[in-house]
Amino acid sequence: MDSQEVTITHYFGGDLGRAGLEEIFGSFKEQSGVTVVDSPIGHEDFKDGILVRAAGGNLPDVFSYWAGARTQFVVDGGNIAAIDDMWAANGLDAVIAKSVADGATMYDGSRHLVPFGYHYAGMFYNAKLMAEAGVTEFPTDWDGFLALCENLKSQGITPIALGTKARWPGQFWFDYLLLRTAGPDYRAALMAGDASYTDPEVQRAMELWKELVDAGYFAPNANADDWTDASDKVARGDAAMTLMGTWITGYWNGQGMMAGDDYDFFEFPAIDAGVPNAVVGPVDGWLISANAPNRANAEALVSFLASDAEVQAKWAQIQGALSANVNVDVSTYTPVMQRALEAVGNADTFAFNYDLATTPPAAEFGLDMFSRFMDSPGDYMQHLADTEEGARGVFDSQ
């Protein structure tokens, strides 16, 4: 029987996210009388910690998770409740954008995930530094991007900051280079284990990445920095740009930077003609555990979090996220986020980033590869062979 509480665990543990959620959970209690018992976990610790709790049958009623292969992994483990009846009863078809609902909520033919927000990865830059360097137009193709990097470097400006200490920030480079050359269908095959990391398509993506490193366009010692360190370098003007998700806007806004005046972004440039335009990013959502003792309260909470337009607008502003709720007023976004929304809307495909697109055990090998590559890009063929060996073992055991 449901009590007057619901337990929840999530990875929104930063100061802004924690304070924002406490306020949102307070609003839910005012409406429902149900207390949210909140137990956040640090972002990196969450990835393994929640799987340990799932294996031990010790999940909370509700927990945040990333749509895609990670959600499929826990659904396959029998740990997640299907929510088709709740979805229909609360009219979520009329609330959640169809493109997000189709791509992020369905697993094994049933609704399982309720979207809370989503992000887009683009090339975020220091607007004032670019203006001082005389950059007034931003590249849409690869030659233009190389020219921009060379122009910045010739003026003593480090073009690109990247912080791969936690491995995952490197995935956006791998994702976009592969998507812009081999295309989304090939990339989906690689993520599913139906292609090899030693294929010519993957080799070419890594060669393009290596050319950027060899040209001196990346700030040195990427593996010593986290993504916030790389973001700080751009904010200070120690580097011009960084390839990152839109959560960087929430981070920079929290430091008093102004969207459009202090920072902006451009889309990752096209490389090969005729390749569909894919954008990359994660969808954050909520899952209800299969054995949730407070199931009715859990369903009420996740419906509230997705359906209430004010809650969605507040969360989008705090996190620098885009809302999947079609009732959120676009004018609540900053000009930069409005352009990010346009970029997603104009894309042919929305692709989950690497560690959400392939199964978690296989993703570990790829994430290791990205960090190893930044230390020794000349060994990328060996890195690819090692990744293929590890990932093949995962897929063959399934």
Image (spheres, grey):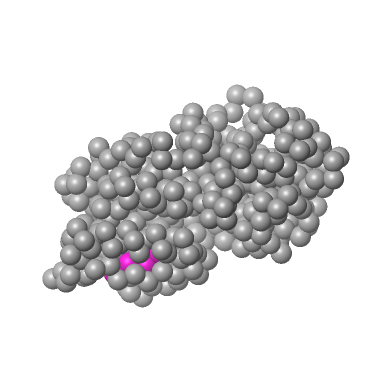
| Residue sitting nearer the eye, 282 or 51 | 282
Q: Viewed as shown, does residue 319 lie left or right of 7?
A: right
Q: Residue at left 30%, top 38%?
A: 327
Q: Residue at left 49%, top 40%?
A: 334
Is 361 magenta? The answer is no
Q: Viewed as shown, does residue 98 lie left or right of 364?
A: left
| Residue sitting nearer the eye, 146 or 272 | 146
Q: Residue at left 34%, top 56%?
A: 286
Q: Viewed as shown, does residue 258 lie left or right of 132?
A: left
Residue 87, x across and y down, in percent = 22, 47
Residue 317, x across and y down, in percent = 44, 48
Residue 308, x across and y down, in percent = 27, 48
Residue at the left extreme of this rendering: 1
Q: Is residue 153 above or below residue 114?
A: above
Q: Quadrant location of the C terminus?
A: bottom left
Rendered image quadrant of residue 232: bottom right
Residue 15 in view, yes or no? yes
Residue 46 in view, yes or no? no
Q: Residue at left 72%, top 36%?
A: 131
Q: Is residue 97 above or below residue 31?
A: above
Q: Is residue 146 above or below residue 112?
A: above
| Residue sitting nearer the eye, 378 or 340 | 340
> Magenta region's main secondary structure?
strand
**Magenta span covers which residues?**
7-11
Q: Quadrant location of the N terminus?
A: bottom left
Residue 366, x across and y down, in percent = 61, 56
Q: How many marks overall?
A: 0
